Image (tube, rainbow, N blue to C red):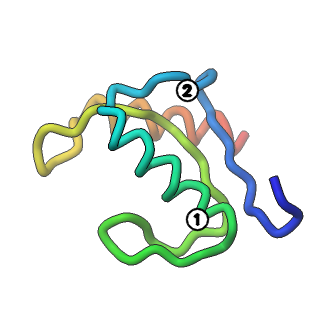
Amino acid sequence: MSPGDKPLVSLHGEISTPPLSKAARLEAGDLLRMLQKGETLPMPHSRPMPAIVLLEVFEKKTKETPRRVIDVCKERIRNYES
């Protein structure tokens, strides 16, 4: 990590192989690296944020995020903040 990079935190173990295709994994990695370097990504990829916290990795098959994923993420961020 370069001195200017923003922190990247995973709150639930190590992410070794998310449920994504190889092309999607490469794109996600590129986007995360850009965020770490402080670059601004346009919607729908990202909103401005001071740090990057990975709460969950899942395969999104519909426009809506599943309630289970939202609940898990809320619990993890509560634990992270305490």
How far apart are the alpha carbons under marks 2 and 1? 18 Å
Q: Nearer the viewer, mark 2 or mark 1?
A: 1
Q: Residue furthest right?
A: 3
* Residue named by callout 2: 15
Q: Residue at x 88, y 64 (%)?
A: 3
Quarter of the image for residue 59 reads top left
Residue type at numbered disc 1: Met
Q: Amino acid at mark 2?
A: Ile
For marks 2 and 1, the one nearer the N-term is: 2
Residue 48, image x and y in percent? Answer: 53, 75
Where disc 1 sits, the SS reads helix
Between 66 and 8, the one lying in front of the other is: 8
Residue 58 coordinates in the image, percent (x, y): 33, 32
Disc sitting over residue 34 in the figure: 1
- Give the vertical position of 67 relative to 6 (above or below): above
The one nearer the camera, 32 or 13, is 32
Identify whether 71 is placed above or below 17: below
Which residue appears at 41% of the width and 33% of the height?
Answer: 57
61 vs 56, left or right, is left
Judge the density around disc 2: few (<14), some (14-19), many (≥20) Cα neighbours within 10 Å: few
2 and 1 marks in contact (CB < 8 Å): no
The C terminus, quarter of image = top right
Left or right: 81 as drawn, with respect to 70:
right
Residue at x 39% of width, y 77% of height: 42
Disc 2 secondary structure class: loop
Q: Residue at x 49, y 58 (%)?
A: 31
What is the total number of numbered labels drawn onto the structure image?
Answer: 2
Image coordinates of residue 79 in percent, x first then y, are 64, 34
Instruction: Judge whether 75 appears above or below 48 on screen.
Output: above
How far across and down, in percent of the image, does residue 60 sit? 22, 39
Q: Quadrant of residue 13?
A: top right
- Could you say which is closer to the camera, residue 32 or residue 76? 32
